[in-house]
Amino acid sequence: MAFLPDGRSLELNLMYIHLTSIKNETTGHETKEENFLLPQLHVVTGFFDRWRWGFSITEPGGLSKRWSDAPENITAKKFQLRVFEFNPSFSYKISETLALGGGLRYIYTDGEVEAEGVLRSHMEGHGNRYGYNVALSFRPSDTFGMAVTYRNRIDLKETGYFESDGVFAVFGRVGAEVSVPLPATLDVAADYTFNNGDTTLEVVYEKVYWGKYQSLDFNYDNPIIEGSIVGQPKEKNWINTDTYRIGLTHHYDEKLTLMFGYAHDETPIPDETLGYELPDSDANIFSLGFRYKFNEYMEIGMAYLLDKKDDRSVTNTSVGHAEFTNTYAHLVSFGLGYRY
């Protein structure tokens, strides 16, 4: 924010996400397709001396998978977690080349889990958590800049209820909770502008500290359910991951700006704990988009992103032997920016 042009700005964005049906080649079964529509908001104030303020609403994480057939639906008939982040932030311009930033994070989560088989269970919950983010930005010239950003780990605690019309039906609705980490992330980024100021190359290295996610433990108010196999912690043993991003922005003329991007994203899930609720794998991500400036106050933008995950074959106690294919995510984003 410290190095944006002076004046206030507002950005509204609407993102459509389509998740394809993942196929388990071993059984021939597929997940249901998923579709989401996510609004986003970013606001930046003008300068107050060396200070500037901002606010954003985003959805930084979450997942959704639904299987209709056994054995997949025994543990993952429906496994959904949505994460919304509200982030008031600030920047302080230490000098003409150096700025400090930070913010508070309010996280709201909403989750739902359904299982078939002898359990035939349903669980819903929601939670509220707080965190922070800090950043340092260095721009020694008009053509080169660097930034480091850190977001802390937040343990998302879902509190709600568990009920079953299977073996635990006699207990009715039971209080339940589960904790899942939203991992800490460290980003190191740099940009270089060339071609008479018309083209900018950006590179980002991101470290995601998924290694704190070692088990998934559903806790129940009823001691019989808590002491059963359902109440026992499930090993996850996720690992820290690296993501590499590269982007190219080109000002075609005074009104039109073109953008291209590529990223390689590693999965944190080891073979031994991969489950049907999230059959994840390494991904190659491709994106392109444009911004069009109507006048000095308003511009629109549109972008498309393809997230293509590698096919993955695993053998473990959770899935037996499974081979997951056709894992794609398609994202289309429409944005409106207004500066005043």
Image (cartoon, rainbow, N blue to C red):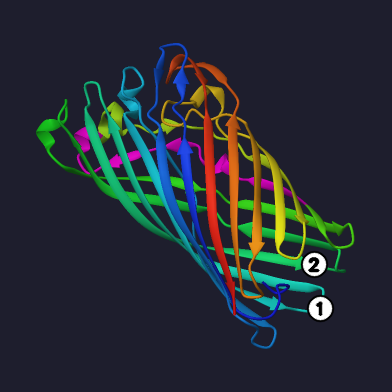
Name the residue at 52% across, 36% down: 329
Report the disc number at residue 142. Answer: none
Q: Position of residue 305 (x, y in %)?
A: 59, 42
Q: Is residue 327 above or below residue 101?
A: above
- How far apart marks 1 and 2 lie (CA) works out to 9 Å
Disc 2 crowd rating (10 Å Cα; few below 14, some 14-19, many 20+) is: some
Q: Position of residue 141 (x, y in %)?
A: 87, 69
Q: Is residue 15 above or below residue 211?
A: below
Viewer-proximal residue among 272 and 125? 125
Q: Which residues are magenta?
A: 202-225
Viewer-proximal residue among 10 and 319? 10
Describe residue 252's horizontal placement relative to residue 61 as left or right.
right
Q: Quadrant of the C terminus?
A: bottom right
Q: Is residue 188 above or below residue 111?
A: below
Q: Which secondary structure, mark 2? A: strand
Q: Callout 1, which amino acid? A: Glu
Q: Quadrant of residue 91?
A: bottom right
Q: Quadrant of residue 336?
A: bottom right
Report the disc number at residue 96. Answer: 1
Q: How many marks?
A: 2
Q: Which secondary structure, mark 1? A: loop
Disc 1 crowd rating (10 Å Cα; few below 14, some 14-19, many 20+) is: few
Describe residue 131's horizontal placement relative to residue 120 as left or right.
right
Q: Position of residue 186 (x, y in %)?
A: 66, 53
Describe residue 276's horizontal placement relative to residue 191 as left or right.
left
For label 2, the residue is 138
Name the residue at 82% across, 73% down: 97
Give the mark, 1 or 2, whose residue is nearer the N terminus: 1
